[in-house]
Image: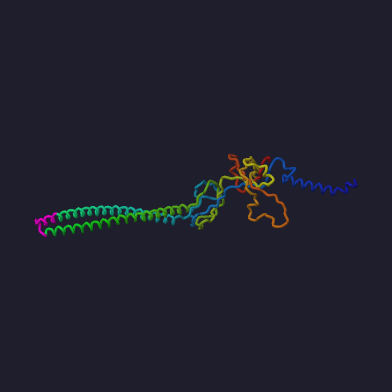
Amino acid sequence: MTRLRRHLPALVIAAIGLAGAGGVLYAWRLPPFQGGEIRTENAYVRGDVASLSPRIAGYVAEIPVDDFEPVTEGEALVCLDDREQRQALARAQAGLAGAEAALKANTQAIRSAQARLEAAQAAAGAARAAVDTADAQNARQARLQAKGYASEATAEDAILSLRQAEAALTAAQSQVDVAREAVASARIGTQALEADRADARAAVEEAKLQLEFTVVRAPADGRLGRVRVRPGQYVSQGATLMSEVSSRVWVIANLRERELADLRPEQPVRVTVDALHDRAFTGRIARLSPATASEFSVLSTAAATGNFTKIAQRLPVRIEIDPGQPEAGRLAPGMSVVMHAERRG
Protein backbone atom coordinates (compact mmCIF):
# COMPACT_ATOMS: atom_id res chain seq x y z
CA MET A 1 0.00 0.00 0.00
CA THR A 2 2.87 2.33 0.82
CA ARG A 3 4.47 1.48 -2.53
CA LEU A 4 1.19 2.29 -4.33
CA ARG A 5 0.99 5.63 -2.61
CA ARG A 6 4.57 6.35 -3.54
CA HIS A 7 3.88 5.72 -7.29
CA LEU A 8 0.40 7.31 -7.31
CA PRO A 9 1.49 10.76 -8.62
CA ALA A 10 3.38 9.14 -11.48
CA LEU A 11 0.38 6.98 -12.32
CA VAL A 12 -1.93 10.02 -12.32
CA ILE A 13 0.43 11.94 -14.61
CA ALA A 14 0.64 8.93 -16.94
CA ALA A 15 -3.15 8.60 -17.00
CA ILE A 16 -3.55 12.29 -17.78
CA GLY A 17 -0.98 11.98 -20.58
CA LEU A 18 -2.73 8.96 -22.05
CA ALA A 19 -6.09 10.72 -21.84
CA GLY A 20 -4.65 13.82 -23.56
CA ALA A 21 -3.06 11.72 -26.29
CA GLY A 22 -6.30 9.84 -26.75
CA GLY A 23 -8.20 13.11 -26.96
CA VAL A 24 -5.85 14.40 -29.64
CA LEU A 25 -6.09 11.16 -31.62
CA TYR A 26 -9.89 11.25 -31.36
CA ALA A 27 -10.12 14.92 -32.33
CA TRP A 28 -7.97 14.35 -35.39
CA ARG A 29 -9.63 11.03 -36.21
CA LEU A 30 -6.32 9.21 -36.09
CA PRO A 31 -5.96 5.47 -35.45
CA PRO A 32 -7.58 3.86 -33.60
CA PHE A 33 -10.41 6.45 -33.73
CA GLN A 34 -10.63 7.11 -37.45
CA GLY A 35 -13.85 5.11 -37.73
CA GLY A 36 -15.82 4.94 -40.99
CA GLU A 37 -16.39 8.65 -41.54
CA ILE A 38 -14.28 11.42 -43.01
CA ARG A 39 -15.03 14.68 -41.26
CA THR A 40 -13.55 18.17 -41.45
CA GLU A 41 -14.51 21.57 -40.10
CA ASN A 42 -12.14 23.25 -42.56
CA ALA A 43 -14.93 23.80 -45.05
CA TYR A 44 -16.77 26.90 -46.24
CA VAL A 45 -19.58 27.86 -48.59
CA ARG A 46 -18.31 29.50 -51.76
CA GLY A 47 -20.04 31.34 -54.60
CA ASP A 48 -19.53 33.76 -57.46
CA VAL A 49 -19.02 37.24 -56.02
CA ALA A 50 -18.68 39.84 -58.77
CA SER A 51 -17.45 43.37 -58.16
CA LEU A 52 -19.54 45.68 -60.35
CA SER A 53 -17.84 48.71 -61.89
CA PRO A 54 -18.76 51.29 -64.55
CA ARG A 55 -17.03 51.14 -67.92
CA ILE A 56 -17.04 54.93 -68.18
CA ALA A 57 -16.65 57.77 -65.70
CA GLY A 58 -19.51 60.09 -64.79
CA TYR A 59 -21.91 61.42 -62.19
CA VAL A 60 -24.43 59.05 -60.64
CA ALA A 61 -27.97 60.06 -61.58
CA GLU A 62 -30.04 57.25 -60.07
CA ILE A 63 -29.64 54.09 -57.98
CA PRO A 64 -32.83 52.03 -58.26
CA VAL A 65 -31.61 49.30 -55.86
CA ASP A 66 -30.55 49.07 -52.22
CA ASP A 67 -28.32 46.93 -50.01
CA PHE A 68 -28.77 43.14 -50.12
CA GLU A 69 -31.66 43.22 -52.62
CA PRO A 70 -32.29 40.28 -54.96
CA VAL A 71 -31.74 41.22 -58.61
CA THR A 72 -32.28 39.57 -61.98
CA GLU A 73 -29.92 39.41 -64.94
CA GLY A 74 -29.90 42.66 -66.91
CA GLU A 75 -31.59 44.71 -64.19
CA ALA A 76 -30.37 48.32 -63.93
CA LEU A 77 -28.37 48.88 -60.76
CA VAL A 78 -26.72 52.29 -61.27
CA CYS A 79 -27.62 54.96 -63.84
CA LEU A 80 -25.05 57.62 -64.73
CA ASP A 81 -25.81 61.03 -66.21
CA ASP A 82 -26.13 60.25 -69.93
CA ARG A 83 -26.65 63.69 -71.47
CA GLU A 84 -23.19 63.86 -73.01
CA GLN A 85 -23.52 60.36 -74.45
CA ARG A 86 -26.92 61.18 -75.96
CA GLN A 87 -25.49 64.28 -77.62
CA ALA A 88 -22.58 62.27 -78.95
CA LEU A 89 -25.03 59.72 -80.36
CA ALA A 90 -27.05 62.49 -82.04
CA ARG A 91 -23.86 63.89 -83.63
CA ALA A 92 -22.85 60.45 -84.83
CA GLN A 93 -26.29 59.83 -86.31
CA ALA A 94 -26.17 63.21 -88.08
CA GLY A 95 -22.76 62.30 -89.48
CA LEU A 96 -24.15 59.00 -90.73
CA ALA A 97 -27.08 60.79 -92.39
CA GLY A 98 -24.62 63.17 -94.10
CA ALA A 99 -22.47 60.28 -95.31
CA GLU A 100 -25.51 58.47 -96.72
CA ALA A 101 -26.68 61.68 -98.43
CA ALA A 102 -23.24 62.19 -99.97
CA LEU A 103 -23.28 58.61 -101.20
CA LYS A 104 -26.70 59.13 -102.80
CA ALA A 105 -25.48 62.34 -104.43
CA ASN A 106 -22.48 60.48 -105.75
CA THR A 107 -24.74 57.79 -107.18
CA GLN A 108 -26.68 60.51 -108.97
CA ALA A 109 -23.42 62.01 -110.20
CA ILE A 110 -22.43 58.65 -111.65
CA ARG A 111 -25.73 58.44 -113.49
CA SER A 112 -25.28 61.97 -114.83
CA ALA A 113 -21.70 61.22 -115.91
CA GLN A 114 -22.88 58.04 -117.59
CA ALA A 115 -25.58 60.01 -119.43
CA ARG A 116 -23.00 62.55 -120.58
CA LEU A 117 -20.78 59.70 -121.76
CA GLU A 118 -23.63 58.21 -123.76
CA ALA A 119 -24.40 61.63 -125.26
CA ALA A 120 -20.73 62.11 -126.15
CA GLN A 121 -20.64 58.65 -127.72
CA ALA A 122 -23.75 59.49 -129.75
CA ALA A 123 -22.16 62.78 -130.86
CA ALA A 124 -19.03 60.90 -131.83
CA GLY A 125 -21.14 58.49 -133.85
CA ALA A 126 -22.80 61.39 -135.66
CA ALA A 127 -19.39 62.98 -136.32
CA ARG A 128 -18.13 59.69 -137.72
CA ALA A 129 -21.14 59.50 -140.01
CA ALA A 130 -20.46 63.09 -141.13
CA VAL A 131 -16.86 62.12 -141.94
CA ASP A 132 -18.07 59.19 -144.00
CA THR A 133 -20.49 61.46 -145.87
CA ALA A 134 -17.87 64.11 -146.46
CA ASP A 135 -15.39 61.50 -147.64
CA ALA A 136 -17.89 60.08 -150.12
CA GLN A 137 -18.72 63.59 -151.38
CA ASN A 138 -15.04 64.39 -151.79
CA ALA A 139 -14.47 61.22 -153.78
CA ARG A 140 -17.42 61.96 -156.04
CA GLN A 141 -16.26 65.54 -156.69
CA ALA A 142 -12.78 64.27 -157.43
CA ARG A 143 -14.14 61.90 -160.09
CA LEU A 144 -16.33 64.63 -161.61
CA GLN A 145 -13.38 67.05 -161.69
CA ALA A 146 -11.26 64.42 -163.40
CA LYS A 147 -13.91 64.11 -166.14
CA GLY A 148 -14.27 67.87 -166.35
CA TYR A 149 -17.80 67.95 -165.04
CA ALA A 150 -16.94 69.81 -161.79
CA SER A 151 -14.98 72.91 -161.13
CA GLU A 152 -11.81 73.06 -159.07
CA ALA A 153 -13.54 75.24 -156.47
CA THR A 154 -16.23 72.64 -155.97
CA ALA A 155 -13.59 69.96 -155.43
CA GLU A 156 -11.75 72.14 -152.91
CA ASP A 157 -15.00 72.78 -151.04
CA ALA A 158 -15.50 69.02 -150.77
CA ILE A 159 -11.99 68.56 -149.38
CA LEU A 160 -12.57 71.36 -146.86
CA SER A 161 -15.84 69.79 -145.74
CA LEU A 162 -14.03 66.48 -145.21
CA ARG A 163 -11.33 68.15 -143.09
CA GLN A 164 -13.97 69.92 -140.99
CA ALA A 165 -15.86 66.65 -140.46
CA GLU A 166 -12.66 64.89 -139.38
CA ALA A 167 -11.88 67.70 -136.90
CA ALA A 168 -15.40 67.46 -135.51
CA LEU A 169 -14.94 63.68 -135.08
CA THR A 170 -11.68 64.23 -133.21
CA ALA A 171 -13.39 66.72 -130.89
CA ALA A 172 -16.31 64.33 -130.34
CA GLN A 173 -13.94 61.47 -129.48
CA SER A 174 -12.14 63.76 -127.02
CA GLN A 175 -15.48 64.49 -125.37
CA VAL A 176 -16.10 60.75 -125.11
CA ASP A 177 -12.74 60.28 -123.36
CA VAL A 178 -13.50 63.15 -120.96
CA ALA A 179 -16.94 61.73 -120.16
CA ARG A 180 -15.47 58.26 -119.61
CA GLU A 181 -12.92 59.67 -117.15
CA ALA A 182 -15.71 61.52 -115.36
CA VAL A 183 -17.60 58.24 -114.89
CA ALA A 184 -14.45 56.53 -113.58
CA SER A 185 -13.76 59.38 -111.14
CA ALA A 186 -17.31 59.26 -109.84
CA ARG A 187 -17.03 55.51 -109.28
CA ILE A 188 -13.74 55.93 -107.45
CA GLY A 189 -15.44 58.55 -105.28
CA THR A 190 -18.09 55.95 -104.44
CA GLN A 191 -15.50 53.78 -102.71
CA ALA A 192 -14.31 56.69 -100.60
CA LEU A 193 -17.87 57.67 -99.71
CA GLU A 194 -18.76 54.09 -98.81
CA ALA A 195 -15.74 54.06 -96.49
CA ASP A 196 -16.99 57.32 -94.96
CA ARG A 197 -20.42 55.78 -94.44
CA ALA A 198 -18.90 52.70 -92.79
CA ASP A 199 -16.87 54.95 -90.50
CA ALA A 200 -20.01 56.94 -89.65
CA ARG A 201 -21.90 53.74 -88.86
CA ALA A 202 -19.07 52.61 -86.59
CA ALA A 203 -19.20 55.99 -84.85
CA VAL A 204 -22.95 55.51 -84.27
CA GLU A 205 -22.40 52.02 -82.82
CA GLU A 206 -19.65 53.33 -80.56
CA ALA A 207 -21.90 56.16 -79.38
CA LYS A 208 -24.66 53.62 -78.64
CA LEU A 209 -22.20 51.54 -76.63
CA GLN A 210 -21.12 54.59 -74.65
CA LEU A 211 -24.78 55.32 -73.96
CA GLU A 212 -25.35 51.74 -72.82
CA PHE A 213 -22.31 51.99 -70.55
CA THR A 214 -24.06 54.72 -68.55
CA VAL A 215 -26.20 51.98 -67.00
CA VAL A 216 -24.54 49.33 -64.81
CA ARG A 217 -26.62 46.15 -65.01
CA ALA A 218 -26.68 42.90 -63.08
CA PRO A 219 -24.59 40.26 -64.88
CA ALA A 220 -26.71 37.39 -63.50
CA ASP A 221 -29.46 36.54 -61.04
CA GLY A 222 -28.35 36.97 -57.44
CA ARG A 223 -28.28 39.29 -54.47
CA LEU A 224 -26.44 42.53 -53.94
CA GLY A 225 -23.93 43.31 -51.27
CA ARG A 226 -23.58 46.76 -49.76
CA VAL A 227 -24.17 49.60 -52.22
CA ARG A 228 -21.12 51.86 -51.99
CA VAL A 229 -22.28 54.77 -54.15
CA ARG A 230 -24.87 57.52 -53.83
CA PRO A 231 -26.69 59.82 -56.31
CA GLY A 232 -24.65 62.84 -57.35
CA GLN A 233 -21.35 61.11 -56.65
CA TYR A 234 -18.68 61.17 -59.37
CA VAL A 235 -17.35 57.70 -60.12
CA SER A 236 -14.32 56.86 -62.21
CA GLN A 237 -13.98 54.07 -64.72
CA GLY A 238 -13.41 50.72 -63.01
CA ALA A 239 -14.34 51.93 -59.50
CA THR A 240 -16.18 49.31 -57.42
CA LEU A 241 -19.78 50.38 -56.91
CA MET A 242 -21.19 47.24 -55.29
CA SER A 243 -20.87 43.47 -55.32
CA GLU A 244 -23.29 40.83 -56.51
CA VAL A 245 -23.45 37.31 -55.15
CA SER A 246 -24.71 34.70 -57.57
CA SER A 247 -27.54 32.45 -56.48
CA ARG A 248 -25.36 29.41 -57.24
CA VAL A 249 -23.19 28.25 -54.33
CA TRP A 250 -20.97 25.28 -53.54
CA VAL A 251 -18.69 24.09 -50.73
CA ILE A 252 -14.91 23.92 -50.63
CA ALA A 253 -13.62 21.44 -48.03
CA ASN A 254 -9.90 21.28 -47.25
CA LEU A 255 -9.15 17.64 -46.42
CA ARG A 256 -6.00 16.10 -45.01
CA GLU A 257 -3.95 14.25 -47.57
CA ARG A 258 -4.31 10.91 -45.74
CA GLU A 259 -8.09 11.06 -46.32
CA LEU A 260 -7.95 11.60 -50.08
CA ALA A 261 -7.49 7.95 -50.94
CA ASP A 262 -10.97 7.21 -49.57
CA LEU A 263 -12.74 9.84 -51.71
CA ARG A 264 -14.01 9.56 -55.25
CA PRO A 265 -15.72 12.01 -57.64
CA GLU A 266 -19.54 11.85 -57.47
CA GLN A 267 -19.31 10.40 -53.96
CA PRO A 268 -22.27 11.60 -51.82
CA VAL A 269 -21.44 13.74 -48.81
CA ARG A 270 -23.29 15.62 -46.11
CA VAL A 271 -22.56 19.13 -44.87
CA THR A 272 -23.90 20.85 -41.77
CA VAL A 273 -24.07 24.63 -41.64
CA ASP A 274 -23.12 26.46 -38.45
CA ALA A 275 -25.24 29.51 -39.25
CA LEU A 276 -28.41 27.39 -39.69
CA HIS A 277 -28.21 25.51 -36.37
CA ASP A 278 -26.18 22.71 -37.96
CA ARG A 279 -28.83 22.04 -40.57
CA ALA A 280 -27.67 19.25 -42.89
CA PHE A 281 -27.58 19.40 -46.67
CA THR A 282 -26.67 16.65 -49.07
CA GLY A 283 -24.24 17.03 -51.92
CA ARG A 284 -21.67 15.23 -53.99
CA ILE A 285 -17.95 15.55 -54.62
CA ALA A 286 -17.56 17.31 -57.95
CA ARG A 287 -13.80 17.72 -58.33
CA LEU A 288 -10.57 17.40 -56.40
CA SER A 289 -7.96 20.12 -56.64
CA PRO A 290 -4.96 19.27 -58.84
CA ALA A 291 -2.57 20.40 -56.07
CA THR A 292 -2.54 21.01 -52.35
CA ALA A 293 -3.47 24.41 -50.99
CA SER A 294 0.17 25.16 -50.11
CA GLU A 295 1.13 24.92 -53.80
CA PHE A 296 -1.09 27.91 -54.57
CA SER A 297 0.45 30.11 -51.89
CA VAL A 298 2.79 32.97 -52.74
CA LEU A 299 5.56 31.76 -50.43
CA SER A 300 7.23 28.44 -51.18
CA THR A 301 7.02 25.67 -48.57
CA ALA A 302 10.30 24.04 -49.65
CA ALA A 303 12.74 23.56 -46.77
CA ALA A 304 15.90 25.65 -47.23
CA THR A 305 17.89 24.23 -44.29
CA GLY A 306 18.99 20.85 -43.08
CA ASN A 307 16.19 20.71 -40.49
CA PHE A 308 12.85 19.31 -41.63
CA THR A 309 9.49 18.91 -39.96
CA LYS A 310 6.82 17.03 -41.84
CA ILE A 311 3.55 18.98 -42.02
CA ALA A 312 0.37 17.28 -43.12
CA GLN A 313 -1.00 18.99 -46.22
CA ARG A 314 -4.61 19.68 -47.15
CA LEU A 315 -6.18 19.47 -50.59
CA PRO A 316 -9.31 21.46 -51.52
CA VAL A 317 -12.32 19.46 -52.65
CA ARG A 318 -15.30 21.03 -54.41
CA ILE A 319 -18.73 19.84 -53.28
CA GLU A 320 -21.89 20.60 -55.26
CA ILE A 321 -25.06 20.99 -53.20
CA ASP A 322 -27.96 18.84 -54.41
CA PRO A 323 -30.75 21.03 -55.83
CA GLY A 324 -34.27 21.30 -54.47
CA GLN A 325 -33.40 21.12 -50.75
CA PRO A 326 -35.41 23.26 -48.30
CA GLU A 327 -33.62 26.43 -47.10
CA ALA A 328 -30.76 25.88 -49.56
CA GLY A 329 -31.40 29.44 -50.70
CA ARG A 330 -30.13 30.68 -47.33
CA LEU A 331 -26.62 29.41 -47.99
CA ALA A 332 -24.28 32.34 -48.45
CA PRO A 333 -20.61 32.43 -49.47
CA GLY A 334 -18.28 32.47 -46.49
CA MET A 335 -20.46 30.42 -44.14
CA SER A 336 -18.64 27.79 -42.11
CA VAL A 337 -19.75 24.18 -42.62
CA VAL A 338 -18.71 20.73 -41.46
CA MET A 339 -18.29 18.05 -44.10
CA HIS A 340 -19.12 14.41 -43.48
CA ALA A 341 -18.37 11.59 -45.90
CA GLU A 342 -18.23 7.84 -45.65
CA ARG A 343 -14.79 6.33 -45.83
CA ARG A 344 -14.46 4.27 -48.99
CA GLY A 345 -11.59 2.12 -50.06
Q: Quadrant of residue 120?
A: bottom left
The percent coordinates of residue 95 (x first, y second) are 38, 56
In the rendered structure, the answer to whether residue 83 lies left or right of residue 113 reads right
In this view, which residue lies farthest toward the left? Answer: 149
The boundaries of the magenta stretch are 140-152
Q: Give above or below for 337 relative to 139.
A: above
Residue visible at 64% across and 50% down in the picture: 293
The residue sitting at the front extreme is 147
Q: Nearer the viewer, residue 77 or 290?
A: 290
Q: Identify the image quadrant of the C terminus.
A: top right
Q: Position of residue 189 (x, y in %)?
A: 34, 56
Q: Please check the rendered image and state whether residue 248 is part of the magenta-colored stretch, yes or no.
A: no
Q: Residue at x 53, y 47 (%)?
A: 220
Identity of the residue drawn at 58% across and 40% down: 323
Q: Which residue: 70% across, 51% down?
A: 311
Count of marks, rendered view = 0
Q: What secondary structure characterizes most of the magenta part?
A: helix
For this rendering, which residue is in front, 120 or 129? 129
